[in-house]
Image (cartoon, rainbow, N blue to C red):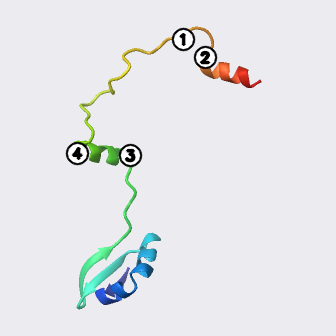
Amino acid sequence: METIGIRELKENLSRYMKRVKTGERIIVTDRKKEIAIIMPLEKKSNEEKIYQLIQRGMACWSGGKPKGMPTRIVSMGKSVSDAVIENRR
């Protein structure tokens, strides 16, 4: 990790942000005292995103399977995929 001062960071912010985008971490100092670390954000998994929506109240889940169509629709005859394949011939 590279250590840089605030003034250097201000003067060359774009250059340092490009380095952070590539995965590098940078320590920022103020009068030779470490005050922050700039590092890239990690990509969140779908589960984490969903959990955050639930925490914010934008989604709700009481456990179990989602409620929707109560029963499966039973079709007679060929499956849809067989019909599509036959139609392509």
Q: Classify 10 Å Cα crowding around label 1: few (below 14), some (14-19), many (20 and above).
A: few
* Residue 46: mark: 3
Spatial CA span between label 3 and label 2: 32 Å
The numbered mark, 3 or 1, whose residue comes first in the sequence reads 3
Q: Is residue 11 left or right of residue 78?
A: left
Identified at 40% across, 14% down, the residue is 71
**Decide: marks 1, 2 in contact (CB < 8 A)?**
yes
Q: Amino acid at mark 4?
A: Gln
Q: Determine the residue located farthest toward the top in the rendered image.
A: 76
Spatial CA span between label 4 and label 1: 40 Å
Element class at badge 2 = loop
Identified at 24% across, 83% down, the residue is 34
Question: Does 56 sit above or below residue 31?
Answer: above
Identified at 25% across, 36% down, the residue is 60
Question: Does 25 sit above or below residue 52?
Answer: below
* Residue 63: mark: none
* Residue 75: mark: 1
Q: Amino acid at mark 1?
A: Ser
Instruction: Where is residue 25? Give x, y as percent.
Output: 38, 75
Residue 84 seen in render? yes
